Amino acid sequence: MTCATEIETKQEYAKLLVDMLPHVIHTEEENESYTAALERLLAKRDRTAEEGRMVELLTLLIEDFEDKNYSLPPATPRDVVRHLMESNGLRQVDLIDVFGAESTVSEVLSGKRDLAKSHIEKLSLRFNVSPELFFEQYSKSPAPDVYTR
């Protein structure tokens, strides 16, 4: 967690608030405006404590808008393998060393077979990515400690 800088001059912070009139972002135009304002503040070498607080506020507002409007659904392990194959110009036959047989590659990519632990280990080493990338993502349900697909 970062340590928040104390506001030194309420009048300066109030002026920043009046100039910016920050609020929850609802449109792309507002998002672009806030992003430009944030970039201007970040470009300053010696920001005041009040400007630092405005950076925090704008960042939260922009992140909230972008999370709601641009977030992608979690990728399945199969999607990840497909993406890595496409990004590296690979075909199924190129992953025989990982899966043992082209038929196994085909079964994994078609969803007929899940990735085995050995596949995950070999894929993470081959593509230099975290094994976590190949685990199914679960979202929390309303009940505590219960997960659904």
Image (cartoon, grey):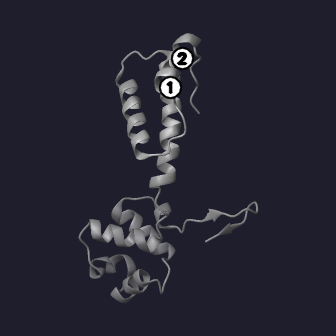
Q: Measured from the top left, where is residue 40 in percent x and y?
A: 36, 26
Which residue is at 34% across, 68% downward? 83
Q: Position of residue 133 (x, y in %)?
A: 46, 62
Residue 67 bears which disc, if any? none
Residue that mark 1 sits on: 54
In this rendering, the answer to whether 29 lies above or below 43 is below
How packed is label 2: few (under 14 Cα within 10 Å), some, or many (20 or more)?
some
For disc 1, the neighbor class at 10 Å (few under 14, some 14 to 19, many from 20) is many
In the visual, does 43 lie left or right of 19?
Answer: left
* Quarter-of-image position of residue 145: bottom right
Q: Dots 1 and 2: beta carbons under 8 Å?
A: yes
Specify whether 145 is left or right of 89.
right
**Residue sitting farthest toward the left:** 89
Which amino acid type is shown beneath numbered disc 2? Tyr
Q: Nearer the viewer, residue 92 or 87?
A: 87
Kindly identify the residue that appears in the image at 59 percent across and 33 percent down. 1
Q: Residue at x 36, y 33 (%)?
A: 36
